[in-house]
């Protein structure tokens, strides 16, 4: 398992209002990691659902027949080093007793 970065994935899940939606889903998804110390240092990734994506991963965005579809996203939104340098999360040190 790769632990030096943070990834973000979306799973389309089965729901009560699926009959009201248009399938395949063709929306824009935006992931934002908020930096509460310095709002000028947020990390944002926007993903548009394109025709090429639908052809490559047709099962991710179709109407779910099970609890959820295959996930999609990115394995690298931000590295752990960038998170620490931006003070988004502070590294915890274990104390020895």
Image (spheres, rainbow, N blue to C red):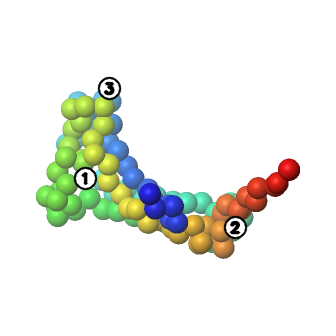
Could you tell me which secondary element the residue under label 2 belongs to?
loop
User: Between tags 1 and 2, which lies in front?
Assistant: 2
Q: Earlier in the sequence, mark 3 or mark 2?
A: 3
Compared with 97, 32 (above or below) is below
- Mark 2 Cα within 10 Å, few/some/many (few <14, many 20+)? some
How far apart are the two marked residues, 3 and 2, measured between alpha carbons? Answer: 40 Å
Dot 3: what SS? loop
Residue furthest right as drawn: 97
Label placed on residue 87? 2
Q: CA distance from mark 1 to mark 2?
A: 35 Å
Res 50 quadrant in image? bottom left
The answer to whether any part of residue 67 appears in the image is: yes
Q: Mark 2 or mark 1, which is nearer the start of the sequence?
A: 1
Q: Residue furthest front?
A: 97
- List x then y, in percent, for residue 28: 34, 57
Foreground residue among 39 and 33: 33
Q: Residue 52 appears at what percent x and percent y?
A: 17, 64
Residue at 24%, 36% (x, y): give it: 64
Residue at the disc numbered 3: 16
Dot 1 surroundings within 10 Å: few (below 14), some, or many (20 or more)? Answer: some
Q: Residue at x 37, y 49 (%)?
A: 10
The residue identified by callout 1 is 26
Q: In this image, 20 relative to 9: left or right?
A: left
Q: Position of residue 26 (x, y in %)?
A: 25, 52
Spatial distance from mark 3 to mark 1, Cα to Cα?
19 Å
């Amino acid at each position: 398992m790769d632990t030096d970065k943070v990834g973000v994935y979306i799973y389309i899940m089965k729901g009560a209002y699926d009959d009201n939606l248009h399938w395949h889903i063709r929306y824009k998804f935006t992931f934002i990691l908020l930096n509460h110390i310095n709002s000028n240092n947020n990390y944002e990734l926007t993903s548009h659902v394109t025709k090429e994506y639908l052809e490559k991963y047709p099962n991710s965005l179709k109407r779910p027949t099970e609890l959820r579809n295959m996930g999609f996203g990115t394995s690298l939104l931000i590295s752990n080093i960038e998170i620490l340098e931006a003070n988004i999360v502070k590294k915890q040190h274990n104390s020895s007793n």
